[in-house]
Image (cartoon, rainbow, N blue to C red):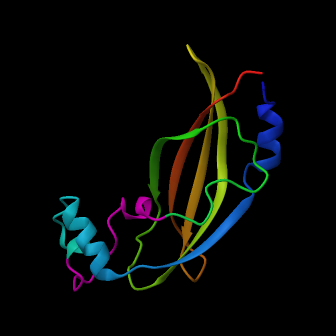
Amino acid sequence: MDADIQAIRDQFLGQAFDEKQFEIEPNVTAEYARLCGETLPKFTDTEDPDFQASPTFVASLSGGRSLPAGFPRFGLGMDAGKGIECLQPVRPGQPLIGKTHLHDIYTKTGRSGRMIFVVARLAFFDEAGNHLANSDSRIVMREKSA
């Protein structure tokens, strides 16, 4: 197939293709933190004055689509890892808006041929438009040979 990755990058990178609103329940984030082994009250005690979701919580949220409409299929996609960037605290009880776009597309070549990596970024904002966090999901696809 030998896809032109630069043309695909030019067409799809940075284009928002999904938006979803999340209602984050304080008890859910406190339980999530507890199950992750967190002990700081600001993550586990809903009455703490600085109560917030633990940094990894946003990785448990997902949008409605993982790839934009019209994105080429190179083969079966597999999970290639997650990444989180915390910019400001996520406060449970306040609406959270997630906007998804493709953040990166790159290739690596291995023994089995060329692998195409796609990084879908779910960026989280509060109602005022403040950028709170990013959750990156990497998908790897082995390119089908012609």
The image quarter containing residue 127 is bottom right
Name the spot of residue 62 as percent of width and height, x first: 51, 63
The image quarter containing residue 106 is top right
Q: Residue at x 27, y 67 (%)?
A: 32
Q: Nearer the viewer, residue 38 or 146?
A: 146
Q: Residue at x 32, y 65 (%)?
A: 54
Residue positioned most to the top = 111
Name the spot of residue 22 as percent of width and height, x first: 50, 77
Name the spot of residue 107 as percent of width and height, x first: 65, 28
**Vertical comparison of 120 with 52: above or below:** above
Q: Quadrant of the C terminus?
A: top right
Q: Nearer the viewer, residue 65 or 99?
A: 65
Name the spot of residue 23 as percent of width and height, x first: 46, 81
> In screen coordinates, is 138 left or right of 50?
right
Q: Residue at x 60, y 66 (%)?
A: 64
Q: Residue at x 79, y 52 (%)?
A: 70
The image quarter containing residue 60 is bottom left
Asked if residue 50 can be seen in this view, the reply is no
**Vertical comparison of 111 with 121: above or below:** above
Q: Quadrant of the N terminus?
A: top right
Task: Identify the magenta region.
Answer: 45-61
Q: Nearer the viewer, residue 35 or 95?
A: 35
Asked if residue 98 can be seen in this view, the reply is yes
Q: Magenta part mainly helix, strand or loop? A: loop
Within the magenta stretch, is there residue 97? no
Within the magenta stretch, is there residue 46? yes
**Vertical comparison of 9 with 46: above or below:** above
